[in-house]
Amino acid sequence: MERRLAAILSADVVGYTAMLARDESGTLAALEASRSLMSGLVRQHSGRIVDAVGDNVLAEFASAVDAVQCALNVQEQINARAAADGSPDAKGPAMRFRIGITVGDIVVMGDRIAGDGVNLAARIESQAEPGGVAVSGAVLEQVEGKLPVRFDDKGDFTLKNVQRPVHIYFVSQGEEEASSAQPAAVSDDVHVPGFGGRGAIAVLPFRNSGGSTDDEYFVDGLTDDLVTMLGSLREYPVISRNSTFAYKGKVVDPRQVGQDLQAHYIVTGSVRRAGDRLRVNAELVHTHDGREIWSGRYDREMRDVFELQDEITVAIAAAVAPALSHSERLHAIRRPPQNLDAWECVHRGMWHLFRYTLKGTKKARKWALQALSLQHDSVSAHCLVAFSWMNEVIYHWVKEREEPLQEAMRSAERAFAIDSQDALALCALGFAYSLMGNNERAKSLLERAVVHNPSSALAWWGLGTAMSASARPDDGIPLVEKAMRLSPQDPLLHEFNYTIASAHFQARRYPQAVEFARRSLELKPEQPGALQVLAAALALEGNAEEARTAVAQLVKLTPELSEERLREYLNEASVEHRLEGLRLAGWRG
């Protein structure tokens, strides 16, 4: 049996027994039609119908936000059907439901669930009004501020077979506030069904600034490819091009578009052709207040049109992805901790992970575990746990590396088991295998990662690192350079430079190794690996004084570093070469 935390939805028909007595066949037909509607809406909101016995429907969701929005949508559509009773297409008598939702611990037995949470949801449902939704205080904590809804406090209830009084709230759709002066801003917490509170992206048709109708196919194709590319990231919902192309040729207000499409972000831009050159401008805008989050300009010579289109699409998608992640991290870090859902917990954790301190890494893991308590199948959260353990090994924050590496491997394997096509999961597992010394398995996984997300700088860097660790280090350098081009402001830029430094050192190009090691240390001074390469390369090129200075910094940072420890991290050929340089620099570890 598996235990996990879930949002549980229980729904029952109001007056079902009396309806059966009056019209059995009509009631059963109406129930079947209502269940079919519910089933579709539950799937749309990433939930799962667990059971449907008698007139009851039981469903579970990873996100309380999704559960509440699903319940409100169900009631809206069921109540609309009830109001239309008597119309020619009405199936059976009018049917109304009560719905109750709570967040609680469940026991999973195959396709069935049980536990106190299931019982509590049923008891809360019995207190709901016909056509209404009732929730527990635990649901309020998860949902408040994330949906445009009102909570009506009904106080404490003593419920059958529930030991303690339960505080219950009735939920209803909030009133919309219209302003004639300017378009309403999209809420900072626009919710997309089934995505656990993630903000949607709308890619508007790029403008053809050159005016030539011959270029229209290229401009529209660029927009189409960008929609597809961003959708392949599978991290953010992307509005269909059928909706966004309605704005082709129009001057738009980002806030109005955001309101119309319920999109959190929009990507827009222009294309201008002058002779044999093409200039593409693109920008990412937050629809809440119209502020620009990122912009980029791409100047290219006209070659093969389709190859050029692909190149620019990948470049824009690669730049937009980290800008979106950075915006989501800042948003999560500003929110009160008690109001975070699983998605925001992950981004809050990412914010701490990128501090690259032991304290920040432990906080990142704490937030990842909090996300998993809210959504057990969050691939991003499992990956965050894995990377937090790997950081402790990479930056020498642990005395023994075996246990943290095993923890990293377990978390990466869980992410991979949930979604074997997720680029982040493939990267996490690839890095874990690399640190465990299985470089061939690491390369295989990371090659799959770049196929599934060709704009992932993380995947290209990981593959470049794995290739550089082999007997042919030059194979990896172009891949890491591609990662740097894809994400020139990446939080991992110090690691990108370190990987290139290591590859040059392995190829015995010591001046280049020194150059890239220094670049890495300028971005993050406290890096044992970069200091090792710097000291060894300086010594082997004959710069003894600076080599001794680098070794002194290395010993101060990692006094426990030993030859045995180095052999755990590096292959045989690499470790002998590095030891030669370090000893020449004066290291006595």
Image (tube, helix red, strand yellow):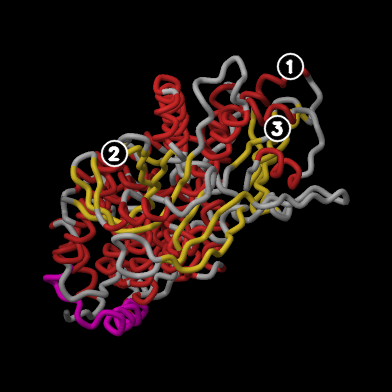
Residue in view at x 39 percent, y 46 percent: 10
**Amino acid type shown at disc 3:** Phe
Q: Which residue is mark 2?
A: 420
Secondary structure under the numbered disc 2 in the rendered image: loop
Which residue is under mark 3?
Answer: 206
Q: Residue at x 42, y 30 (%)?
A: 35
Instruction: Check if residue 555 falls in the magenta segment.
Output: yes
Image x and y of residue 396, in percent: 25, 72
Would residue 264 appear left or right of 342 to someone viewing this image? right
Q: Amino acid at mark 2?
A: Ser
Alpha carbon distance from label 3 to label 1? 15 Å
Q: Secondary structure at mark 1?
A: helix
Type of amino acid at the residue the image marks with label 1:
Asp
As helix, strand or loop, the secondary structure at mark 3 comes to loop
Which segment did they paint magenta?
545-566
Is the magenta region chiefly helix, strand or loop? helix
State the residue position of label 1.
214
- The circle on residue 472 is none
Precedes in sequence: disc 1 or disc 2: 1
Q: Is residue 272 visible?
A: no
- The quarter of the picture where the C terminus appears is bottom left
Between the C-alphas of marks 1 and 2, the distance is: 42 Å
Q: Quadrant of residue 75?
A: top right
Q: Quadrant of residue 387?
A: bottom left
